[in-house]
Amino acid sequence: MEVKGDNYKIWYDNNAATVNFKGVLRLNGVEEYKEIFKLLNDVMTEEPARITLNLMHLEFLNSSGITMLSKFVIEMRSKTIHLMILGSNNLSWQGKSLRNLQRLMPNLNLTFV
């Protein structure tokens, strides 16, 4: 599973149960994030024991993208799947934005590298 754009790439590594995000995501509105949201939901439907979202190489995510991730986290609350999000200490937007996701799902494992 993979979604590509001019400035970004999102792909699922089945062996590691990890969705990797790379580049800059500045799509217009939640509607344009549907393909990425579908990829995340497809991974969730497989019901692995855990899912890791690797955002360490995602340089920017606009408010529509954060809304999309928030909706995914809210859907994950009803599952028994362990969710881990990897962020980067070097990308300032991630600190506050990703911690807000943890408020939506307190047992979310949030790690900054």
Image (cartoon, rainbow, N blue to C red):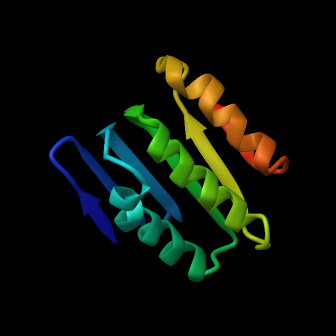
Q: Give the number of callouts.
A: 0
Q: Is residue 14 visible?
A: no
Question: What residue do we see at 28% from left, 62% from top?
Answer: 3
Q: Position of residue 42 (x, y in %)?
A: 49, 77
Q: Is residue 23 left or right of residue 66?
A: left
Q: Is residue 23 left or right of residue 51?
A: left
Q: Is residue 78 above or below residue 106?
A: below
Question: What residue do we see at 70% from left, 72% from top?
Answer: 49
Q: Position of residue 39 (x, y in %)?
A: 42, 69
Q: Position of residue 40 (x, y in %)?
A: 50, 66
Q: Is residue 71 above or below residue 24?
A: below
Q: Is residue 44 visible?
A: yes
Q: Is residue 29 left or right of residue 104?
A: left
Q: Nearer the viewer, residue 27 or 93?
A: 27
Quarter of the figure that contains the C terminus = top right
Quarter of the figure that contains the N terminus = bottom left
Question: What residue do we see at 42% from left, 36% from top?
Answer: 61
Question: Which residue sits furthest right?
Answer: 106
Question: Which residue sits furthest bottom?
Answer: 46
Q: Nearer the viewer, residue 18 or 99?
A: 99
Q: Is residue 59 above or below residue 36?
A: above
Determine the image quadrant of residue 87: top right
Question: Which residue sits furthest left?
Answer: 6
Q: Is residue 57 above or below residue 80?
A: above
Q: Position of residue 92 (x, y in %)?
A: 51, 17
